[in-house]
Image (cartoon, rainbow, N blue to C red):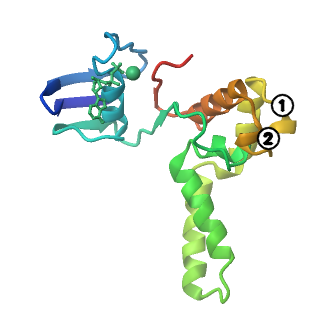
């Protein structure tokens, strides 16, 4: 669920939104329609937190996670395909990176050990052990074969990149999925 309260935004003299109040409730699929330049993309960016409105708030339901289909197809050029999919779950990916970093530490202190245990706990809670197989299944379902899973995004064709980004958005079953003009 997304609750939008009193959201306003203007660019210079141009008022895009004034006191917008709307609730997007679970189980539904909503379409946002408007002329070119009306502010559809801007509204989605406000919902995702990419930009801030000048007044008002946007709230996600408790414990809900939002995913966004990236429009910049070249955002992950240096990343591996499988990893790019997992990056769709921001917190899980962050935990994985912190874990990797802490195990590289030398000396490895007691404090590092405690932190590592904490990270392992969160990793398990977020289904971290299932992340790679789940990402691989999503990719395969979209027609991205295993031969591509460990390649860099830069090596993929345009349409393959779009499929990987779609897998990224779907990864880990987000509660809310935002798609801005997906082709
Ligand atoms: N960062 C910005 N600074 C100033 N004006 C902007 C900015 N981003 C978008 N706009 C303007 O806001 C309006 C809405 O843009 P946008 O949300 O992209 O429209 P839509 O997605 O409905 O086509 C347009 O007139 C656009 O030029
Ligand atoms: Mg747009």
Q: Counting other residues with Cα less than 10 Å from the Cα at mark 1, is it few (<14), some (14-19), or many (20 or more)? A: few
Say which quarter of the image contains residue 183: top right
Q: At 57% across and 60% down in the image, what residue appears?
A: 95
Give percent across and percent down for residue 90: 52, 48
139 vs 67, left or right, is right
- Most foreground residue, 146 or 24: 146
Q: At 65% across and 51% down in the image, what residue appears?
A: 128
- The residue sitting at the right extreme is 147
Say which quarter of the image contains residue 48: top left
Q: At 70% across and 51% down in the image, what residue appears?
A: 129
Q: Callout 1: helix, strand or loop?
A: loop
In the image, residue 90 sits, relative to residue 70, either above or below, namely: below
Reading the image, the residue beneath label 1 is 145
Label 2–label 1 contact, CB within 8 A = yes
In the image, residue 42 sits, relative to residue 80, either above or below, namely: above
Q: Is mark 2 within 8 Å of ligand 2?
A: no
Say which quarter of the image contains residue 96: bottom right
Q: In which quadrant is the N terminus drawn?
A: top left
Q: Callout 2: helix, strand or loop?
A: loop
Give percent across and percent down for residue 12: 15, 33
Reading the image, the residue beneath label 2 is 149
């Amino acid at each position: 669920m997304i609750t939008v309260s009193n959201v306003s935004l203007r660019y210079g003299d141009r008022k895009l939104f004034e006191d917008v109040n709307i609730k997007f409730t679970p189980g539904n699929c909503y379409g946002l329609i408007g002329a070119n330049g009306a502010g559809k993309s801007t509204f989605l960016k406000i919902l995702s937190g990419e930009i801030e409105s000048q007044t008002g708030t946007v709230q996600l339901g408790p414990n809900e996670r939002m995913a966004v289909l990236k429009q910049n197809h070249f955002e992950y050029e240096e990343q591996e395909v499988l990893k790019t999919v997992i990056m769709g779950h921001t917190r899980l990916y962050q935990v994985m990176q912190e874990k990797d970093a802490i195990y590289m530490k030398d000396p490895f202190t007691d404090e590092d050990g405690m932190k590592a245990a904490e990270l392992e706990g969160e990793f398990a809670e977020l289904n971290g052990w299932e992340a790679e197989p789940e990402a691989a299944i999503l990719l395969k379902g979209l027609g991205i074969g295993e031969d591509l899973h460990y390649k860099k995004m830069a090596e993929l064709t345009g349409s393959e990149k779009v499929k990987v980004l779609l897998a990224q958005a779907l990864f880990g079953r987000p509660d809310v999925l935002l798609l801005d003009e997906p082709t």
